[in-house]
Amino acid sequence: MTPEQIQAMLEANLAGCTAKVVSDDHTHFDARVICDAFAGKRPLQRHQMIYAALGDKIGGDIHALSITALTPEEAGSGGG
């Protein structure tokens, strides 16, 4: 998978989110996801939402995913 494909999946499956995904090898990815739906959620819950959005690609086409999951307010205040 490409970073662009993962970004598109995240943005399609997490309403109102924006994502930036990068990778040097198309196996290990770094994702920064900003989403209103993360408000009031613990980091584990945010990661679970991202894993759900990517479905069976996690552990398959996506071998490793480093996640920064922020609300717009957190992103605006320099969080992550």
Image (cartoon, rainbow, N blue to C red):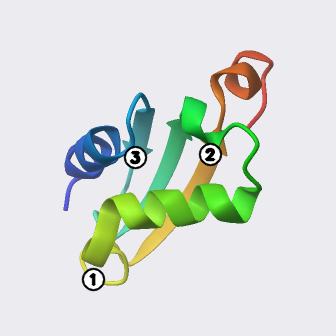
Q: Quadrant of residue 44?
A: bottom right
Visible in this render: residue 47? yes
The furthest residue to the top: 76
Q: Amino acid at mark 2?
A: Ala
| Residue at 31% across, 70% down | 55
Q: Residues within 10 Å of mark 1 (few under 14, many from 20)?
A: few
How far across and how far down the image is residue 69, in percent? 62, 45
| Front position in the image: 74 or 23 | 74
Q: CA distance from mark 3 to mark 1?
A: 17 Å
Q: Nearer the viewer, mark 2 or mark 1?
A: 2
| Front position in the image: 78 or 14 | 14
Looking at the rendered structure, the secondary structure element under dot 2 is: strand
| Residue at 49% across, 53% down | 30
| Residue at 25% across, 49% down | 9
Side of 9 relative to 40 (left or right): left
Q: Which mark is residue 44?
A: none
Q: N-terminal of the two: label 3 or label 1?
A: 3
Residue under label 2: 69
The furthest residue to the bottom: 59
Residue under label 3: 22
Establish if 70 lies above or below 28: above
Q: N-terminal of the two: label 2 or label 1?
A: 1
How far across and how far down the image is residue 45, in percent? 65, 61
